Image (cartoon, rainbow, N blue to C red):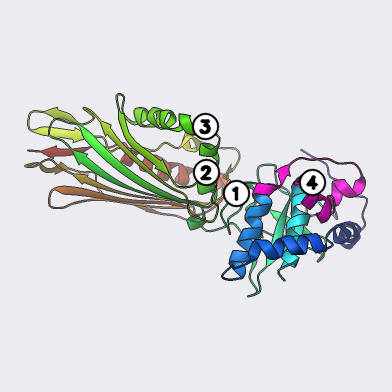
């Protein structure tokens, strides 16, 4: 339970108060203009210019919150102060980013939001309810979209998932809009595995991953926090969680500091004795396939399930069999289509190879209580499918 109050009679009163503060702080100075001109020199198009500014504010402005006045609290410091200091909080960075966009002729506004992990923003009474500041942009082609330069690991045009689906208060323009929840493809992981099965049960795996959106930022941020000389050890721990006694052969990451390039990862490892053989029959637990859903543990719920955003995972696995072996049994295909998720998984036998193609998409951020039973059953069906082994015979 909560009670919310406001000293403003109308939303326009609240907007006008903050509009004056923000506008005064968004002066485009010669120093900022000169820096932006240097930053975007040689850019191929307007999107590359916006992206370069986005990356610069993310990585060159440390998050430090200093509030010394009402103006600093409501609308941040001036863009020039933040530019010179190279630090600021979310409002400071929002003001600076909007001002730098102005230098390339792109309309941008700092907007106040309440992140989706902190409840739903109040819009019933005239108050600018929020705990965070991000940016709304109007692309020259007319598209409206949002960026959050507070985080340090997001590739343009992606932004933090706790901003997805929330209300954004634009005081300068004088309105409140709801930020759309991006499609699942904007928060995705694609994995391709080549699995080679030896007649004695040893398994050799080559994994190639690429990432997009919050998923990419999360992976990038995790590995940036791990010392370079300790990364191989951390990956060895991961492959041993797949199968005890696993041996890591190779592990590479693309440049973690280059936000303009999609993050990729390759992992090569061996799983000695991972497949179990009984005379002419051998069964294999498919590496990395198994999934669990803790949110489906309860039989009933009192409250909705709330995710940060939508999600997509695409997995392709090619299992190469030993000479003389052929598939004996594979799980039946599983296809689920609902308002909240799509899942398609099927094994396909070939000449000396078994192929698995799996696609998981979470389509909505919130699952209401009344729809939980069907959603729970779908997640449990997916978890059961991913635990099933493949049997081959000689």
Q: Which residue is mark 3?
A: 227
Going from N to C along the chain, the mark reached first, 3 or 4, is 4
Q: CA distance from mark 4 to mark 2?
A: 26 Å
The residue mark sitting in front, 3 or 2, is: 3
- Please name the residue that numbered disc 1 is placed on: 161
Residue at screen point 55% across, 35% down: 225
Q: Is residue 164 left or right of residue 30?
A: left
Q: Depth check: 84 or 106 in front?
A: 84
Query: Of helix, strand and loop, which one carries label 2?
Result: helix
Q: Are marks 3 and 2 in contact (CB under 8 Å)?
A: no
CA gap, disc 2 and disc 1: 15 Å
Give the mark nearest the N terminus, 1 or 4: 4
Per the image, is 343 magenta? no
Q: Nearer the viewer, residue 383 or 217?
A: 217
Q: Which residues are magenta?
A: 59-88
Q: Quadrant of residue 330?
A: top left
């Amino acid at each position: 339970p909560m009670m919310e109050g406001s000293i403003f009679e109308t939303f326009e009163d609240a907007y006008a108060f903050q509009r004056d503060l923000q506008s005064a702080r968004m002066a485009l100075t010669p120093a900022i203009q000169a820096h932006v001109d240097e930053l975007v020199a040689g850019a191929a198009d307007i999107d590359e210019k916006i992206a370069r500014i986005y990356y610069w504010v993310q990585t060159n402005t440390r998050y430090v919150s200093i509030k010394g006045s009402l103006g600093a609290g409501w609308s941040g410091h001036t863009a020039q102060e933040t530019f010179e200091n190279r630090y600021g909080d979310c409002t400071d960075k929002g003001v600076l980013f909007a001002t730098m966009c102005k230098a390339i002729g792109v309309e941008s506004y700092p907007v106040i939001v309440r992140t989706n992990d902190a409840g739903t923003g109040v819009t019933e009474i005239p108050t600018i309810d929020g705990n965070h500041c991000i940016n709304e942009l109007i692309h020259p082609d007319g598209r409206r979209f949002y960026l959050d330069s507070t985080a340090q690991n997001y590739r343009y045009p992606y932004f933090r998932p706790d901003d997805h689906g929330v209300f954004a208060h634009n005081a300068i323009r004088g309105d409140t809009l709801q930020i759309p929840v991006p499609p699942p493809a904007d928060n995705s992981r694609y994995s391709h595995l080549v699995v080679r099965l030896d007649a004695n049960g040893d398994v050799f795996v080559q994994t190639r991953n690429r990432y997009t959106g919050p998923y990419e930022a999360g992976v990038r941020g995790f590995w940036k926090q791990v010392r370079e000389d300790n990364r191989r050890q951390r990956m060895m721990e991961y492959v041993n969680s797949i199968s005890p006694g696993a041996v890591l052969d190779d592990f590479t990451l693309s440049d973690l500091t280059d936000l303009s390039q999609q993050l990729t990862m390759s992992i090569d490892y061996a799983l000695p004795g991972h497949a179990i053989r009984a005379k002419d029959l051998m069964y294999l637990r498919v590496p990395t396939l198994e999934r669990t859903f803790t949110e489906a543990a309860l039989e009933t719920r009192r409250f909705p399930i709330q995710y940060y955003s939508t999600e997509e995972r695409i997995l392709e696995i090619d299992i190469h069999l030993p000479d003389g072996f052929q598939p004996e049994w594979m799980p039946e295909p599983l296809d689920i289509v609902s308002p909240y998720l799509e899942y398609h998984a099927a094994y396909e036998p070939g000449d000396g190879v078994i192929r698995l193609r799996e696609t998981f998409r979470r389509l909505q951020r919130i699952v209401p209580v009344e729809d939980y039973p069907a959603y729970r059953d779908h997640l449990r069906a997916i978890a059961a499918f991913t635990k099933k082994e493949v049997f081959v015979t000689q």
